Image: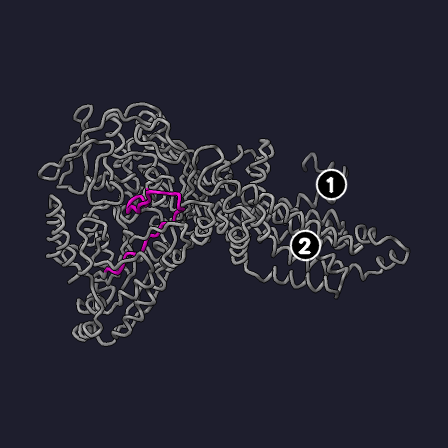
Amino acid sequence: MATRSQKAAVLLAGALTLAACGSGGTSSQAPADGGGAGGGKTLVIDTSFDLKTADPGRTYEPTGLIVGKAVYETLLTFDGADVTKPVPALAESYELSEDGKTLTLKLKQGSTFADGSPITADDVVFSLTRVRDMKGTPSFLLDGVEVAKTDDTTVTLTSKTANPALPYILPNPALGILNSKLAKEHGATADAQDKAEQWLNSSSAGSGPYTIESFNVSSQVTLKANPKYYGTKPAYDKVVLRNVEAATQKLNVQRGDSQIALNLSGDQVTGMPATLQVKKTASANVIFLLANQDSSISKTTPNAKFVEAVRKGVDYAGLLELAGEGATQAPGVIPSQILGALPPEQAAKRDVEGAKAALAASGLSNPTVKLEYPSELTVNGLSFQPLAERIQANLKEVGITVDLQPAPVTTALDNYRNGKEEMGLWYWGPDYPDPSDYLAFLPGKTVGLRAGWKEGAAKEIEAAGVKAAEAIGDDARKSAYAEVQNQLNAAGPFVPLIQPGQNIVSAASVTGIEYHPVWTVDVADLGAK
Amino acid sequence: MKPDAPRERTGRRVPPLARFLVRRVLLAVLMAWGITLVTFVLTNLVPGDPVAANLGQRALGDPAIVAQWRAEHGLDKPLWQQYLLHLQGLLHGDFGTSQQSHRPVADDLAEFVPATLELAGAAILVSLVLGVAFGVIAALRRDRLADHTLRVVSLIGISVPTFWLALMAFYVFFYRLQITPGSGRVDVALGSAPPVTGLQTVDALLAGRWDIFASAAGHLVTPALVLALYTIGLLTRFTRSAVLEVLGQDYVRAARAKGLPGRVILFRYVLRSALVPVITVAGLAFGSLLSGTVLVEAIFAWPGIGQYAYKSATTLDLPAVMGVGLVVGVVYLAINLVVDVLYGVIDPRVRLQ
C-alpha cells in the first residue's frame, strides 16, 4: 500500500518535471537574436515601469516618454544624445525672434499620420493648445504660450516674456502632434473636459514610426511598426516593453530573453559578459542636499557658514564610489548634458579643515541636524539610504551630527514639498533639457521654496536668474547660467552632489543605443545586426 | 399577523443544511461590508498626500492643477461622504477610477485578477496533490527514511522566504540550466490568445492554439511550484498528523483485523476522516497564496494583482488599493464559506451549531 502511493507521488513529480522541461524547450525556440515567430524582428526591452498613460498630453513619466517618442512626432527633436541643439522634425525650420518672444515654425510638407491623412497646421494648433489647456501634468511646458496658425504651413508660438527655452521644450514627447480629427471623434477637447485618454491608451493618433498594439500600465506595452510611416522605417517590426524588476532584468538580458535592460545599477553591470554591450553614461538626474533657510524650521541650517561647512565636508569621491560606474560629480545644479552646465573642474572638493573652520566661524558648537530623505526611492538603481549614511559619516568628521530621518517617499514628499525639512536629500530630473528648468532652485521658486528660500531672500541671485531667463543666444545663455550656478554654489542653500550613472545593457545584435535625458532611448533609432 | 407566518410554522421545515447555508452567506455579506469599511478607513489613514504622489514636481507648484486633481478624484469632500460615494459605487459595480491607470479599477482588476488566480490556482492544485500525497506517505512510513526526508523537506518549504526561493528558482532553472522560460505569462513572440476567461492556458485551449498553451503552461510551472512549496510543507505536516491520528482509532484497527485490503482502509476510512483538518489548512493556505503572489509576481514579471497592488500602494492610488483590498478580502470570505459548507457536508454535526 505504501509503495503504491510512493510510486504515484514519484510519477506525479516526474510528470511535473517533464512538463517544465517540455515547455521550457518550446519557449527557447524563440531565437535570442530578437527574431520573433511572426517572421518580423521583435525587440524586447525590460524596464521598471514608471507609466501612467499613453496620452501624449498627459505623459510625464520615463516609460511613458519612451512610448510617446515612438508613437508621436513633435515639431522639433534632438539628434541622438545631443540635447544642446534642437533639430527639425515635423517642422522643417524654426526661427526665434530677436526679443525671444515669438517662435515661428515652418511645417514639413508631405508628412502623414498613421491613418494616411496629412498633418496640418490645424493639427499642430489643436494638439499644443490641448496640452496647455486641459491642465494635465505636462501643461506647464506651454504656460503662457499662445499657439496660432499663420497659414497652412506656418505656426507661431508667442510668449509674454522672452522664452528662449521653447525650442528645447518642443521635443518633449508630451507635445506630440495628434491627428486632431481622429482624436476629437474620441473625446479630445482643448480644455479640462477632455475625455480622449482612455481611447489613446489603446489606439494611437500619431505619425511616429510605431503605433500602439497593446498597452497596459503595469505589465507590458507592445508597439508595432507604422506601415504608413513616411520617414526611415524602423529596424524592428515589433517592440515589447516589459515591466521587470532590475534583478530579473539582468538575468533576462544575459540569457537572451530580452535584448535591452534599462535599469541596472552600477553594481549590477560590473562583470557583464563580453557578449553584451553596456552603455555607461551619467544620467541627467542631479542628487543634492538642501539646508532649510527658514529660521522657524531650523536655528542651524540658515547659517551660511554652516552650509559652507557641509559643502566642504562632504566626501564627493566616496559618494561616487557608492554610485558605481557611469556616475559623475555634479559641479552645479545643471547636469552635464545640458547647456550651461559648469565644467567638471569647478566641482566642489572635500576640505575637512576648511569645513571645520567654517563651522567654527558659524558660531554653532556641535550642531545636530535632521536629514530627511525618501528611504525606498532609487534613482538609476542607486538607493538614497547608503548615500545618507555616508554623508552622516562625512559630516561627523567635521563636527556636525546628522540625525537620519528616512521615510517612505510619499510621506517624505509631503515635508519636502511644504518646505518643512531641516535638511533634505533629493534629486531633480530635467522636465526639459534647458537650463531655464533649473531656475526652480532660485528664491521663491518651486525648489527654492522647499528649502525655505522665499522671494527676496537673495536679491543678487534672483537678478542673475532674471538675466539668465532673458538671455538670447547660446553663448550669452551659457555664461548667464554659469553665473547663476556660481552664485548658488557660493551662497545658496543647495549642495549639488552627484549624477548617478545610467547603464543600458543590450544584446550584441542591437545597434545605435544612445542614452537620452528626456526619453531614455529612442526605439526607432535602434538597429539590428 | 403576517398571512404566511402560520404556514411557515406548520409547513415544510427548512432543511438544516439550507438554513446553515443561508446563515453563512448572510454572514459573509455582512463581513464583505465590514471589509469595505476597514479598507476605506485604513487607506485613508495612510500618511502622505496622493496628489504629491501622482503629480509631477512642476505641476505641484500650480495650485489650480492641484485643486482640479483633488476635485476630479473626489478628495475635496469630507471623508464620510467619500465613503458613502465609494459604497454607492460598489453597489453598482463601480470601484472608482484608478489614479495611476486612469481606467476604471474594475477593468484593471478584471485584467489582473485572472492572472493571479491562474497562478494561485495552479499552486493550490500542485500543493493539494503533493502535500496530501507526501503527508500520507510520511504517516505510513512513520519514523523511516521517507518520513524523515519528507519532514525535512516540508520544514524547508515552510521556513524558506518565498521571494528568495523565487529568485533562486529563476536563477537556477531559467538562467543556469535554461530549462524554464523567462518572465511573464507567455512568450512575447507568440502574443496571447483572445481573452475569454482571462486564464491564459484555458484561453489558449479554447482558441486551439497549442503553441500558446505550451508556452503558458511552461511559464506557469516555476512560479507555481515556488508559490506552492510553503503550502506543500504545511499540508504534508497536517496530513501526516491527521492520518496518524486516524490510523490509531479503534475502527481502523477493527477494519484491519477484519482483513480489509490496505488500499480500501486508506481511501475509505483514513483519508475521509483526515480530510476535515486538511480542508481547513488548504483554505487558509489559499488565502496566504494570494498574498504570497506579490513577491513571486514581481520576480517573474507576472502581470497579476500583486504588482498592481504594490504599485497602487506606492503611488497612493487609493481607489485601486481599496479595490484590491476588497477583492482579496472577498476571496478569503468565499474560501471560508466553501470550507464551512464542506464541513457541513462532511460532518452533519456542524450544521446544527
**Residue B236 percent across, percent down from the top left:** 68, 58
Classify 10 Å Cα crowding around label 2: few (below 14), some (14-19), many (20 and above).
many
As drawn, the label of residue B131 is 2
User: How far apart are the two marked residues, 2 and 1, measured between alpha carbons?
Assistant: 38 Å
Q: Dot 1 lies on which element?
A: loop
Amino acid, disc 2 = Gly
**Residue A270 percent across, percent down from the top left:** 38, 58
**Residue B110 percent across, percent down from the top left:** 51, 39
Q: Is residue B310 left or right of residue A396?
A: right
**Residue B43 percent across, percent down from the top left:** 44, 51
Q: Nearer the viewer, residue A379 or A84?
A: A84
Q: Which residues lie in the magenta part?
A: A496-521
Dot placed on the residue nearer the N-terminal end, 2 or 1: 1
Amino acid, disc 1 = Val
Label 1 marks a residue whose chain is B
As drawn, the label of residue A15 is none
Q: Does A423 sit above or below residue B167?
A: below
Query: Residue at label 1?
Result: B14
Res B127 seen here: yes
Q: Quadrant of the N terminus of chain B?
A: top right
Magenta stretch contains residue A208: no
Magenta stretch contains residue A497: yes
